[in-house]
Image (tube, helix red, strand yellow):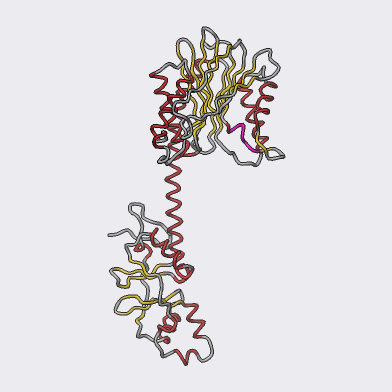
Amino acid sequence: MPAQFNASRGSLPRFRQPSAADLCVVATAITSEETNQAVLDVFNDQRELISLPVVENGRPIGLINRNIFMSQMSKPFHRELYGKKSCIAFMDKEPLIAEANLGIESLTFRAVEYGEKALADGFIITRDGQYAGVGHGLQLMRVVADMQAEKNRQIMHSIDYASVIQRATLQVSRAALAETLTDASLVWEPRDVVGGDFYHFARFADGWFAAIADCTGHGVPGAFMTLISSSMLAQAIERNNPRDPAHLMGLVSRGIKQMLGQTAERSELAESNDGLDAAFMWFDNATQTLTFAGARTALYLLYPDAPQIEMIEGDRAGVGYVDSNADHQWTNRVLPLTPNTLLFVTTDGLVDQIGGRKQIAFGKRRIRDAIVARRHQSTTQITDDLLIELANWQVDETRRDDLTCLCVRIGGTQP
C-alpha cells in the first residue's frame, strides 16, 4: 500500500519521493450535463468546498471556483437566466490537471506556471486520465516547505559532519605545534561551519615547517579546496625537502593545476580558476634562521629591540590559479632570527574585514600596531587581543571571510 499524505499534520513519508497522489483528496465532482442550479446546491450543501471539478466520461474538463460562481449567481436575475443552463458557463476550462504519479517538484513548477488560480482554486488529480480527486494549494505549499526543511536539515547535517572531518584533519598539526613551540598561538575561524583556510605544521629533528593558506572561496567549496591543497602539501613534504618552502609551493601549484585542469594546455577548457594564497616557512634549529616563501601573503617580524614591525611581502603570484605560470618559481627569503623575535602570519580574513566608522578594511597597520603594543605579552594574549579588537572594529558588519593566523615567539623550540 502506498504511503499516504496526512493532510491534518502536513507530514510526508520519508521512505520515497512524494507525488501528487499524496495530496489527493476524494471530492465531489459533477458532469458537464449538470445545471448551474445543481452546482449551487452542491456548494450550499458542502460549505467547505473551495472548487468543484467538472468531468465528462470520467475525465476532468474544468473547475468551478466557489467564490466566482456564487458572485455571479447572486447578481440580479442571474439565477433565473443561468440556473437551468449547463454548469460549463462559469467553469474554468483550463485548470491545472496532474497525474497522480507526478512528482511534487514538477507539480510545483506547473502550479507556478498556472499562477495564483492553481493555489487559490486547487488542482485536479487523475489516474490514467480519469478523475481521482483534488489537491489544494495550501497543502502543496506545506509539502514543499516540509521538503525544503528536510533538505536543509540533511544538508546542515552533512556540513556539520564535514566540519568534524575538517577539524580532525587539522588537529594533527595543532598538536604538533603545541608539542614543538613553547610560545605559539594558532587561530582558525571559518566564516561558515566549514572554511577555506587551512594550516599545516610538522616537526623534524632539525627544525619545523609551518604553512598558513587561504583557498578560493569559503564554506563547502572552500573546504573542498582545503582538502585538495592540504593533501598536495602533505605529499610534497613527504616526497621532497621541507627545508625549501619555495620549491614546495611550486609542487603544490602544479599539482592543483593538473588536478583541476588549469594547465596552459587546457586553460580555455577549464571550468574553474581555483587556488590559494599562502605562507610556507621552514625554521632551522641549528642556524636559528627562518626560510619564508609567500604567495600574496606577508610575513610580520618584530625583532626584540626593533621599534617597528618588519613586513616581508610574498610573491604576487597565487598558487594553482589559471594565470599562475606552471614554471613560476617562488622566492625563498632566509631570515636570521634572534631569541624573542615575534613572527606573525595571517590570511586576508583579518586584513580585509570591513568595519569602523568609515566602513573600511581593518588593514595591516592595525595589525602591526596591535602586535607592537603587546610585544611583551604571550602570543596567546596577542592573538586574543587582536580578535577582540577585530570584533570591536566589525561590530554589526558580517564576517567577510575565513580567518587564520599564527603567532610564534622564537626562543627555544623544544619545550
Residue at (59%, 16%) from the top-left corner? 409
Give the number of callouts. Answer: 0
For the residue pair 305 and 383, the one nearer the viewer reads as 305
The answer to which image quadrant residue 83 occupies is bottom left
Front-lying residue, 348 or 334: 334
**Looking at the picture, how far across and down is residue 292, in whole percent?**
54, 19
Q: Is residue 353 magenta?
A: yes
In this rendering, position of residue 372 left or right of residue 59 = right
Q: Where is residue 240 shown, x and y percent of the image? A: 40, 18
Residue farthest along the top direction in this orientation: 286
Vertical placement of residue 17 versus 28, above or below: above
Q: Quarter of the image holding residue 398?
A: top right
Give me the residue at 52% from left, 29% from top.
317
* The magenta stretch spans residue 337: no
Is residue 16 shown above or below 359? below
89 in relation to 276, above or below: below
Q: In this view, does 305 lie to the left or right of 45?
A: right
Relative to residue 151, is residue 161 depicted above or below?
above
Residue 225: x and y in percent read 45, 34
Dividing the image into 4 quarters, which one contains the N terminus?
Answer: bottom left
Task: Determine the residue positioned at 52% across, 82% down.
Answer: 71
Image: magenta residue range: 349-354
Q: In this view, does 343 lie to the left or right of 27?
A: right
